[in-house]
Amino acid sequence: MEATEDHIASVLAQARRDGFLLRRVPAKQGDFAPGCYFGGSPTMPANMDWPYTDCYDTPPTPLTFIAQINLASLPVLEGHPEAPKSGTLFFFIEPKYGPRHEYASSTTAVLWTDADTLNLPERKMPKFDLTSLPLGELDQEYDHLSSLCALDKCGILFEPRMSIDRHALFELQGVGPAALTRAAELNIEEDDRLRQLQGGDGVLHSMFAGPASFGRLVDGEVIYETQLVPLCAFARDFFYGLSRDSDWVVFWISPEALAKGEFDSIFPYEGID
């Protein structure tokens, strides 16, 4: 029996995510969302420690700051997950290997403060002496550490976006080829619309919507984590210097933890859909 349009619309609505495109704008314009930007230096309170990684079995090295989001600047958008309406999130990452490296637990960090950070001074990345590393024998392994510097600053504007999680569709009753095809079409149409908003740029950073849910290998079977929220997804972006090995990194969180502001439970994951 062929699926009706109403049925297709119903199952797509259950797998739909509503969120934002994090649209890049030149920081010099100054008309971006207050306290929200890529790169540069964070307005992080002095009592917050800069995160480090020890994934090289060498002296700890500072993680690279990639973005901050002032939650009070988020527009009101019907359908996006419940989240705190104040405070600031700071995102950090090891600039090359990131969370898929064997030392994943220390290669990303997300810090949150409920303090007002809008008028705080920017904090520079701590200085690090590259000569303390054994570069003589391990040039190829450590040459990327020369990128341990602030990325170029770009402001963020929030544009509404949606996505259909195709993995979540498989968990629904009565999903057939017509629904899967329509989901793919809608995602392509939306991505094309967003790229036009960004001047044809193919890079789409996002919040609450975007990448499909990721899979874990459990007892030889891939189980998709369709209940988690993609808090923020940062794509490889040469425009402001985020030149990663993988296509993107996504910071996942449960809806319950997001609503309570429990950002220490975030799970980082990277790769492709």
Image (cartoon, rainbow, N blue to C red):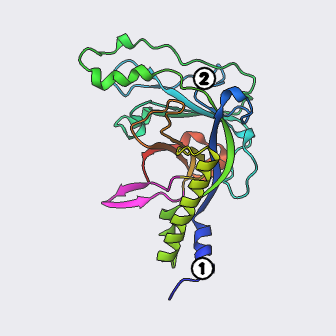
Q: Distance of mark 1 from mark 2, alpha carbons?
A: 48 Å
Q: Nearer the viewer, residue 188 or 135?
A: 188
Please state, as top left, top right, bottom left or bottom right, where the C terminus lies in the image: bottom left
Q: Residue at x 62, y 74 (%)?
A: 9
Q: What residue type is disc 2 on?
A: Ser
Q: Position of residue 57 (x, y in %)?
A: 33, 23
Judge whether residue 89 can be spotted in this image. no
Residue matched to label 2: 41
Label 1 secondary element: helix
Q: Earlier in the sequence, mark 1 or mark 2?
A: 1
Label 2 secondary element: loop
Q: Which mark is residue 7?
A: 1
Q: Residue at x 62, y 68 (%)?
A: 13
Is 71 colored magenta in this rendering? Answer: no
Is 212 colored magenta in this rendering? Answer: yes
What span is colored magenta in the figure? 211-227
Above/below status of 90 relative to 5: above
Q: Residue at x 54, y 70 (%)?
A: 182
Q: Position of residue 192 (x, y in %)?
A: 57, 54
Q: What residue type is disc 1 on?
A: His
Q: Is residue 228 left or right of residue 59?
A: right
Q: Residue at x 55, y 23 (%)?
A: 50
Residues packed near mark 2 inside 10 Å, few (<14), some (14 to 19) or many (20 plus): many
